[in-house]
Amino acid sequence: MAGLPDLPERLRRMLALQWQDLLTKHRFTGEHAEWHERRKGRRYRISIQNPRHQGYLGDPEDVGSIGLAESIAIAGERFEQMKEAYLPLWAARPEPKFEEFEAWLGAIVVSVVSEIQQLWSGLSDWHTTWFAKHCKESVEKALKKRADVEVIRVRRLEIQRLKNADLITSKGNTEAAVLLRESRQTVRGTRPLLDSALALTSVPETSEPREPSAVPNRRKPDLKTSRDRLAFLELAAAELATLKQDLKKHCTAKGLKARHPKFTIWKHIPKQELQELIDGTPFWPKTFAESLALRKFGITSRETLKKDRRKINRSNQSV
């Protein structure tokens, strides 16, 4: 396609199959050839049977809007399919710039309009004229509106990429980028604790042999710490779920904190990280809450939280 990079064979095959699905879904499998004739005949019969409606119905040949809504609907879905196919290619580039993808979106609009035009022009000269006169401009307008929205989204993605190098590593997969970033922050936060622990456990070697302990020390489960960690996790997840709903509307960090002054998460989310969430970085409350718990309690694996749950469950069952 002119103006667009070549897709791998797998993606080209996927787009071809998705197009066939759209044709079936929106009844563009030959049935659309009769839409205008059926509507013209129906309107003409009504005008003959009920003369009072002749003035309201107008000229029975005036069928410009028939097929328009269906054409706009299938064009919109096709635009989304193609956009999703090309977005990873753009994100995987060494230095993806939103202006480049903006040009791709323009080429996608032209390609989709051409596909819709072929659906009608392949029927008859009359349908070709109808598409040019009544349909093409509306389809283009609807697609350009979608493209404008995507330009804003991709520009924000580039801003996030410049702030967050993990978005490059994840090839535009924002969920993977969030997990990478959270993992690295967790490791950075716990490194001082690990260094301290290593220093405490480093005992100088002595020439005197140690006597083996007669009774091995058996560590009792630390239920209090497990309960504290899980209580924080549940509270943070609930607060983040509320925060996610608030972020669907325009808001600021100051406004969020004023609306929820008692939220615990404000103490554990850095200012820059909170601003990234406000700017549109996607997150999942439970996953984010686990990362905050790792950071707060100085643990390095989510498996520890799973062990906490099993530990508490066993304790409850033994009571």
Image (cartoon, rainbow, N blue to C red):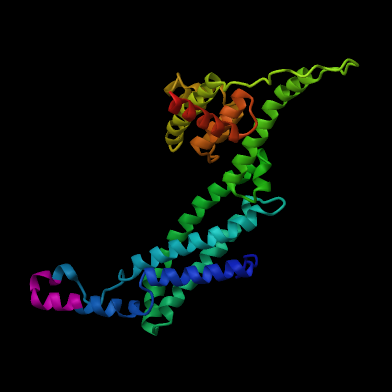
The residue nearer to you, when weighing 258 against 44, is 258
In the image, taking residue 149 as reference, residue 182 lies left or right, namely: right
Give the quadrant of the N terminus: bottom right
As drawn, the residue found furthest toward the right would be 207
Give the quadrant of the C terminus: top left
As drawn, the residue found furthest toward the front would be 214
Task: Name the residue rendered at 59%, 60% in the picture.
Answer: 86
- Above or below residue 271? Residue 65 is below
Residue 113 in sight in this render: no
Q: Quadrant of residue 162?
A: top right
Residue 250 in the image: x percent, y percent? 45, 35
Q: Quadrant of residue 193?
A: top right
Residue 22 in the image: x percent, y percent? 42, 68
Q: Which residues are magenta?
A: 42-54
Task: Name the residue rendered at 64%, 37% in the picture.
Answer: 181
Task: Name the residue rendered at 67%, 43% in the picture.
Answer: 166
In the image, taking residue 97 as reference, residue 267 lies left or right, namely: left
Task: Name the residue rendered at 47%, 70% in the picture.
Answer: 19
